[in-house]
């Protein structure tokens, strides 16, 4: 992985301990990683694995999952209708939209978002860049960290997206430029 400016972890919940450990070691060495949704939260060989805490990846994941409780479901998802992304600060990944402060994702093709119930890991210095809000299927307000960042000791960055970054293409491209140093 050291040959790459950034690694994107997306679309695959089940990653082996060895792969999650390799990603964590890459981050420890100053690598840049973008984690999207529930990627790398399970291991098909160990049904007790739930979340990013196992292997070295867990040392750097900027969010942790809220516990689901005594169920067989590992990842708790929230369906957010009429989603809006609210920016908490000016940040390089928001440079194309930072003047707006609130971005209504319903005006894109993303009228409904499946988000993971996570909380930022402030214990390791993770910072929320943007919050995702909207209503669930019961009409109750929901708020989850939409984009969270953690910097590493050797200059690497780990960015977590709790939604499909394709909903905000300019933010996705700005994030790629930001983590690759372009």
Image (cartoon, grey):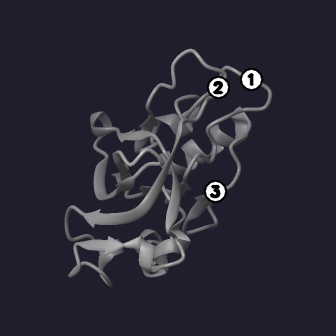
Q: What whole-number distance in Å separates the C-alpha atoms at marks 2 and 1? A: 6 Å
Q: What whole-number distance in Å separates the C-alpha atoms at marks 3 and 1? A: 20 Å
Farthest residue, direction top = 70
Q: Position of residue 136 (x, y in %)?
A: 44, 49
Secondary structure at badge 2 equals loop
Q: Which sits in the foreground, 41 or 75? A: 75
What residue sits right under mark 1 in the picture?
A: 46
What residue sits right under mark 2 in the picture?
A: 49
Residues at discs 2 and 1 in contact (Cβ within 8 Å): yes
Residues at discs 3 and 1 in contact (Cβ within 8 Å): no
Secondary structure at badge 1 equals loop
Q: Position of residue 102 (x, y in %)?
A: 26, 71
Q: What whole-number distance in Å separates the C-alpha atoms at marks 3 and 2? A: 18 Å
What residue sits right under mark 3 in the picture?
A: 10
Q: Which sits in the foreground, 144 or 2? A: 144
- Whether residue 132 appears in this view of the structure is yes
Q: Position of residue 138 (x, y in %)?
A: 43, 44
Whichever of callouts 3 and 1 sits on the residue coming sooner in the sequence is: 3
């Amino acid at each position: 992985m050291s040959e790459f400016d950034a690694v994107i972890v997306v679309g695959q919940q089940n990653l082996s301990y060895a792969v999650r450990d390799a990603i964590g070691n890459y981050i420890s060495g100053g690598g840049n990683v973008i984690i999207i949704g529930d990627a790398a939260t399970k291991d098909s060989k160990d049904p007790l694995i739930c979340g990013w805490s196992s292997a070295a990846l867990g040392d750097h994941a900027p969010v942790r999952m809220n516990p689901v409780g005594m169920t067989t479901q590992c990842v708790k998802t929230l369906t957010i209708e009429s989603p809006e992304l609210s920016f908490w600060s000016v940040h390089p990944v928001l440079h194309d939209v930072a003047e707006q402060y609130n971005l209504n994702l319903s005006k894109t093709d993303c009228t409904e978002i499946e988000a993971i119930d996570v909380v930022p890991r402030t214990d390791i210095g993770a910072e929320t860049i943007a919050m995702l809000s909207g209503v669930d299927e019961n009409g109750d307000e929901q708020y989850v960290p939409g984009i969270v960042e953690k910097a590493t000791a050797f200059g690497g960055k780990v960015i977590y997206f709790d939604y499909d970054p394709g909903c905000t293409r300019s933010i996705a491209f700005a994030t790629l430029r930001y983590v690759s140093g372009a």
